[in-house]
Image (cartoon, coloured by chain):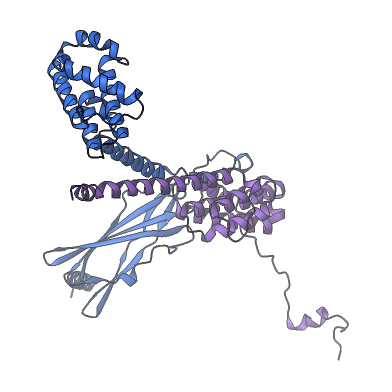
Chain colours: A blue, B purple
């Protein structure tokens, strides 16, 4: 025993390494994505990584709760944790989001205190400590401005309710209504889709509907008016009986129906201007419809 | 029969038409109500506050009272909004309440300094508490950050406890009692 001190030191180192090797906490480290340029009200994150033996679970009761104060200027806002199995080790990652409430006159280094953590396996608890770490807090108000010269920031105004979502919904509903209206117009042949239908075809369609009604003088008058309207539209003006020849000269495609048209004008004059006239049996609504279809096909051929 | 078939096939059309019309009417009604609310917010002097008054109108009234010099009543109304369900409105209320306390505390601090120690301390602490709550709700409120830092700057240092010069010892205790001559029986 020439050097008892050296032997004792050797034993101490040996037992220390044994103790380290047998500890279920293999490593613990803490880092922060940013520990500088922090100002009043900022949030800062501390990321703790702990490697433990497999089977150890983090005791959540050992972690402070969100909203709790760490000291007079730090509060915990959020806590997230996850774990990952790495062979015979478990890696725990605990992210603590702090919010700082301290005002300083010039940049200061502040300390986030150490955080004790407990892990448990089969009722056996083991504690470790995440080390304290520092960050730099910077003032918002320029250092050289005296207190009396600082202009306080004012109040926040009352909120303005824009109702943008309601406007969007209203626009959507109105667009839907417009779409449905357009569909209805197309479906029922209403304007603007009616314009594409040739005048005689349209009159023929209306005469067909009218033909289902009783053969009264009033209905015949309506039918005659439909054909007059179609002729007026084709002529581009109100077509009177005396203008029929000029119209047929200008529109030779209708000359095949000259006799029918002459008879129609004669009957029409009787129906509209004679008193007590009954519907002419020789030129019924179905004949009017037939004439319309003939004129419509002539109109279509010309196009 | 054909007529009936056509009616059935158009059922979806009528359903959608009723839906769109109903939706448009309802949204129009909500927009009308919002416009009325904004109008009332813009004219706080006409607002009569009672227990059924909407939070936004209470806020508007509180701000109006503060601007017209009645900051005590304004503080009372802002304090009522601390439990509002509207988070944004709650943040604004805490911010403005903090601003009222800080403005008052800063005025006394700049005019009288430590002579008004107790008053300045209490006003600044109330301001800090309210700005902290505003920042908890909305960390992006930079005006609250600025004002809270200023509140820290003007926080009076802790008052020192007055030194006690009294050093009593047993033989001298009689001399401190009035009407009892020293060395009496």
Q: In front here: B60 or A238? A: A238
Q: In front here: B24 or A204? A: A204
Residue A234 placement, left or right of A158: left
Residue A137 placement, left or right of B114: left
Q: x and y percent of residue B85 in the render? A: 48, 59
Q: Quadrant of the C terminus of chain A?
A: top left
Residue B130 placement, left or right of B22: right
Q: So how many labels did they put on this image? A: 0
Q: Is residue A9 above or below residue A260?
A: below
Q: As drawn, which residue projects farthest toward the bottom?
A: B185
Q: In front here: B33 or B178? A: B33
Which of the 4 quarters of the picture holds residue A191? Answer: top left
Q: x and y percent of residue A59 in the render? A: 29, 72
Q: Is residue B10 above or below residue A52?
A: above
Q: x and y percent of residue B101 in the render? A: 62, 53
Q: In front here: B184 or A29? A: A29
Q: Quadrant of the N terminus of chain A?
A: bottom left
Q: Is residue A136 above or below residue A149?
A: below
- Tell me if residue A105 can be seen: no
Residue for point 65% across, 47% down: B46
Q: As drawn, which residue projects farthest toward the front?
A: A276
Q: x and y percent of residue A199 in the render? A: 23, 23
- Tell me if residue A10 can be seen: yes
């Amino acid at each position: 025993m020439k050097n008892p001190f050296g032997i004792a030191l050797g034993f101490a180192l040996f037992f220390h390494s044994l103790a380290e090797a047998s500890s279920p906490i293999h490593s613990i480290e803490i880092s922060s994505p940013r520990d500088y340029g922090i100002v009043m009200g900022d949030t800062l994150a501390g990321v703790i990584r702990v490697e433990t033996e497999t089977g150890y679970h983090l005791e959540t009761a050992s972690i402070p709760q969100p909203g709790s104060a760490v000291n007079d200027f730090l509060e915990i806002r959020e806590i997230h944790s996850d774990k990952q199995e790495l062979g015979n080790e478990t890696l725990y990652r605990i992210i603590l989001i702090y919010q700082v409430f301290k005002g300083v006159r010039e940049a200061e280094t502040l300390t986030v205190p150490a955080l004790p953590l407990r892990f448990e396996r089969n009722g056996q608890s083991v504690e470790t400590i995440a080390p304290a770490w520092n960050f730099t807090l910077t003032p918002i108000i320029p250092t050289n401005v005296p207190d009396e010269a600082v202009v306080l920031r004012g109040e926040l105004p009352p909120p303005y309710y824009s109702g943008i979502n309601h406007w969007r919904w209203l626009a959507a509903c109105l667009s839907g209504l417009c779409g449905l209206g357009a569909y209805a117009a197309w479906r029922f042949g209403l304007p603007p889709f009616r314009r594409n239908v040739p005048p005689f075809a349209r009159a023929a369609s209306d005469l067909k509907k009218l033909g289902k009604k009783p053969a009264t003088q009033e209905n015949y008058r309506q039918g005659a008016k439909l054909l007059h309207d179609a002729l007026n539209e084709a002529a581009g003006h109100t077509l009177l009986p005396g203008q029929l020849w000029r119209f047929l000269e200008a529109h030779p495609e209708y000359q095949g129906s000259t006799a029918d048209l002459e008879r129609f004008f004669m009957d029409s004059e009787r129906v509209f201007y004679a008193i007590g006239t009954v519907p002419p049996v020789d030129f019924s609504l179905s004949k009017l419809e037939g004439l319309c279809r003939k004129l419509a096909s002539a109109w279509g051929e010309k196009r | 029969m054909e007529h009936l078939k056509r009616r059935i096939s158009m059922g979806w059309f009528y359903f959608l038409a009723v839906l769109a019309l109903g939706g448009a009417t309802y949204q129009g009604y909500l927009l009308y109500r919002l416009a009325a609310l904004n109008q009332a917010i813009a004219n706080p002097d006409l607002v009569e506050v009672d227990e059924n008054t909407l939070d936004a109108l209470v806020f508007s009234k509180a701000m109006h009272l503060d601007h017209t010099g009645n900051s005590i009543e304004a503080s009372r109304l802002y304090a009522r909004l601390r439990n509002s369900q509207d988070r944004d409105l709650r943040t604004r209320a805490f911010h403005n309440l903090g601003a009222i306390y800080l403005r008052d505390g800063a005025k006394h601090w700049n005019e009288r300094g430590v002579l008004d120690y107790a008053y300045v301390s209490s006003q600044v602490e109330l301001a800090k508490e309210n700005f902290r709550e505003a920042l908890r709700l909305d960390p992006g409120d930079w005006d609250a950050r600025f004002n809270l830092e200023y509140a820290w700057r003007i926080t009076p240092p802790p008052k020192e406890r007055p030194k006690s010069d009294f050093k009593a010892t047993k033989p001298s205790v009689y001399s401190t009692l009035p009407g009892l001559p020293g060395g009496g029986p």
